[in-house]
């Protein structure tokens, strides 16, 4: 029996194609949702749109401090594993649910496959970097999205026979859903706009930084509309600093949107401003300029080959880059190797071997 553990929005786009591929080959599999994300707009909409079956186990852990959340997940995952005894656990990405699942499985002698292994920002202030390091130190099979990830794992002493360069599983969902996305309605009626998402603690958990970012978006919105689907962490922080999201009619704060709607928003945007991991990759695939509000990225191939640029916290640079993009025509980029919609198939071939 194969088990999958997921918990947050970006896990669901990674689970969907692999679950579907395994199902088509008649593997026995079960899904554990830790409940790290639980709002309809952060969870259910993705299961519906991506046609993922309802989780076999919903652990309902919810929002807690890092230690409490990880500990609760581990306790509840162990209870399930004690009853079910999986042969293989598949974990995705770099969130707390990923690390919690891997830790429990490793102590119980259950084999672990990590999808999206080997990415490194080399910045241990990021909780995700700790999750990546821990998960990759105890996994048994490493499915990597790009060659840089293989190099990181080899440097850390992982045996090369365990590392499989299979490509980017998120792009499988994108490729598969593209016809539906193209046929779906636009959710905002704007000719030209910049799309923005931010949710990293490094951008939103500090009052001054959050205000500086919002000021800069207000200033950009005087030139061109800005559409900003607000992550719940960011919503909470904006409320705490007393920011009125209806204040500026060119800066459109909206609720988080479904996957189809969000990809359509990306496809039609002039540029995307983000601190998301997955969105750096999707913009590279779609050929849309991406300005990343971070000092580093665990996805360097989106810079060396794709459309990504690191802005850090330099909001002057952000405004200048937006102005440059508004007048420039073409963007020189390519889609990295194996970001082609066939990653799930390559993973299953490796699992069978
Ligand atoms: C988590 C991941 C992050 C990932 C992001 C994707 C960790 C450490 N962080 O960050 O890597 O990029 O998900 O979106 O695993 N909340 C709700 N409703 C929900 C979920 C969260 O209101 O359905 C609010 C709660 O107030 C919560 C806050 O959002 O305290 C943060 O949620 P949490 O899952 O702890 O971290 P994220 O910032 O979402
Ligand atoms: N996304 C979405 N609706 C939104 C914002 C993002 O469907 O309102 C999708 C986006 O297309 C990508 C994934 O969510 O597939 C990225 O998740 P997120 O930015 O929350 O997490 P990260 O990738 O930073 O871990």
Image (cartoon, rainbow, N blue to C red):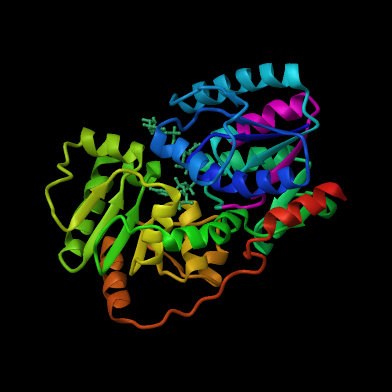
The residue sitting at 35% across, 44% down in the picture is: 256
Q: Is residue 332 magenta?
A: no
| Residue 131 higher or lower than 250, as above or below | above
Vertical arrangement, residue 98 with respect to residue 191, above or below: above
Where residue 326 sits: x, y (%)? 28, 76
Where the N terminus falls, by quadrant?
A: top right
**Residue 225 x/y as whole percent:** 21, 63
Reply above or below: 26 against 150.
Answer: above
Q: Residue furthest bottom?
A: 329
Residue 347, image x, y percentages: 74, 52
Q: Is residue 294 visible?
A: no
Left or right of residue 46: residue 247: left
Q: Residue at x 74, y 48 (%)?
A: 142
Q: How many marks?
A: 0
- Residue furthest left as drawn: 247
User: Would you say residue 109 sits in the magenta stretch?
Assistant: yes
What residue is at 71 percent from the left and 49 percent from the top?
Answer: 21
Q: Position of residue 153 (x, y in %)?
A: 72, 52
Q: Residue furthest right?
A: 353
Residue 296 visible? The answer is yes
15 relative to 224 in the view: left or right: right
Residue numbers of the magenta segment: 98-120
**Figure quadrant of residue 149:** bottom right
């Amino acid at each position: 029996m194969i088990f999958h553990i997921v918990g947050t929005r970006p896990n669901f786009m990674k689970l969907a194609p692999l679950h579907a591929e395994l199902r088509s080959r008649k593997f026995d599999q079960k899904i554990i949702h830790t409940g790290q994300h639980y709002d309809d707009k952060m969870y259910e909409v993705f299961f519906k749109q991506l046609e993922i079956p309802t989780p076999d186990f919903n652990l309902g852990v919810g929002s807690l401090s890092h230690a409490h959340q990880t500990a609760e997940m581990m306790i509840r995952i162990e209870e399930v594993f004690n009853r079910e005894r999986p042969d293989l656990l598949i974990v995705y990405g770099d969130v707390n649910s990923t690390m919690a699942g891997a830790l429990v499985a490793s102590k119980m002698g259950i084999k672990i496959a990590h999808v999206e292994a080997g990415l490194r920002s080399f910045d241990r202030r990021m909780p995700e970097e700790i999750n990546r390091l821990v998960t990759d130190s105890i996994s048994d099979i490493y499915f990597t999205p790009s060659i840089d990830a293989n190099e990181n794992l080899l440097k850390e002493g992982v045996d090369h026979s365990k590392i499989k360069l299979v490509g980017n599983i998120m792009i499988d969902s994108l490729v598969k859903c593209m016809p539906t996305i193209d046929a779906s309605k636009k959710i905002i009626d704007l000719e030209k706009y910049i799309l923005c998402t931010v949710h990293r603690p490094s951008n939103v958990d500090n009052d001054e930084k959050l205000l500086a970012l919002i000021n800069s978006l207000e200033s950009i919105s005087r030139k061109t509309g800005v559409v900003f689907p607000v992550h719940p962490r960011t919503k909470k922080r904006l409320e705490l600093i007393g920011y009125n999201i209806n204040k500026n009619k060119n800066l459109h704060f909206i609720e988080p949107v479904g996957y189809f709607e969000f990809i359509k928003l990306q496809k039609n945007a002039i540029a995307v401003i983000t601190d998301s991991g997955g969105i750096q990759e999707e913009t590279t695939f779609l050929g849309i300029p991406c300005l990343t509000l971070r000092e580093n990225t665990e996805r360097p191939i989106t810079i060396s080959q794709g459309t990504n640029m690191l802005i850090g916290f330099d909001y002057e640079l952000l405004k200048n880059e937006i102005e440059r993009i508004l007048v420039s025509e073409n963007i020189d980029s390519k889609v990295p190797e194996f970001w082609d919609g066939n990653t799930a198939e390559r993973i299953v071939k490796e699992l069978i071997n």
